[in-house]
Image (cartoon, rainbow, N blue to C red):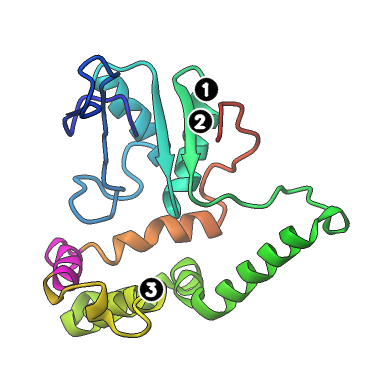
Amino acid sequence: MVRGAVGGRYRCADSSAAPAFTVVVPSLPGFPLSPQRPGQDSAIHQVWHNLMLSLGFARYGAHGGDLGAGITSRLAQAHPEAVVGIHLMAVAAPADMDDATLSPAEREFLARTRWWSEQEGSYQHQQQRRPLSLAPALSDSPVGLLGWIVEKYRARSDCDGDLSRRFSDDFLLTQASLYWYTNSISTSFRPYYEYANGRATPVRRVEVPLP
């Protein structure tokens, strides 16, 4: 989210008159470095809105990718009076989409999406449907947790199978350590489960600007 009061101010290097803004990057409840756990107080999008108000900002923009895309959409849906606009890295297909109206490019995109879900989406299905079968093992074994995390970096980056081309050992160990020392791999599964089981606020129509 932007237009907050945490994280520092940023200006264009060549103009002191350029608008300044602050980037606020909160950690999702249940993920490393978050003081909250899933299910506390209210839905995550409401926690984010309360956070911005507590920092003294009644108007702000928001960005989200992956889980954050849905949270940001719910934030804009619930508080259009506060959210000036949102930017998303993941957008779901319309609920009333008619396949017959799709262009060739749109059909190709959906085919790539289906391929990714089949080849890389098993983690999501497991976390959505049987999280407590997976969580104890990853919470008990640092090697298992490291393997779980490293596999994702290897598969989803442009390293061509050689992790050292893009990531240092220190970086990868840091990512695993954040989950291990905060014991948060299990709680990080919770949003997936809630979404898949109808416990998350559905996204209807978002009226705020979406570039």
Q: Is residue 10 above or below residue 176?
A: above
Residue 205 lies in the magenta stretch: no
The location of residue 64, given as percent across then percent down, is 42, 44
Q: Nearer the viewer, residue 136 or 159?
A: 159
Mark sitting earlier along the chain (1/3):
1
Mark 1, residue position: 80
For the C terminus, the image quarter is top right
- The mark lying in front, picked from 1 and 3, is 3
Q: Which mark is residue 158?
A: 3
Mark 2, residue position: 76
For the residues bearing labels 1 and 2, Cβ distance under 8 angstroms:
yes
Mark sitting earlier along the chain (2/3):
2
The stretch in magenta equals 171-183
- The mark lying in front, picked from 2 and 3, is 3
The location of residue 202, given as percent across then percent down, is 59, 43
Query: Residue placed farthest to the front in the image?
Result: 14
Element type at marker 1? loop
What's the residue at 79%, 48% (across, down)? Answer: 96
Specify the amino acid type for callout 2.
Ala
Specify the amino acid type for callout 3.
Asp
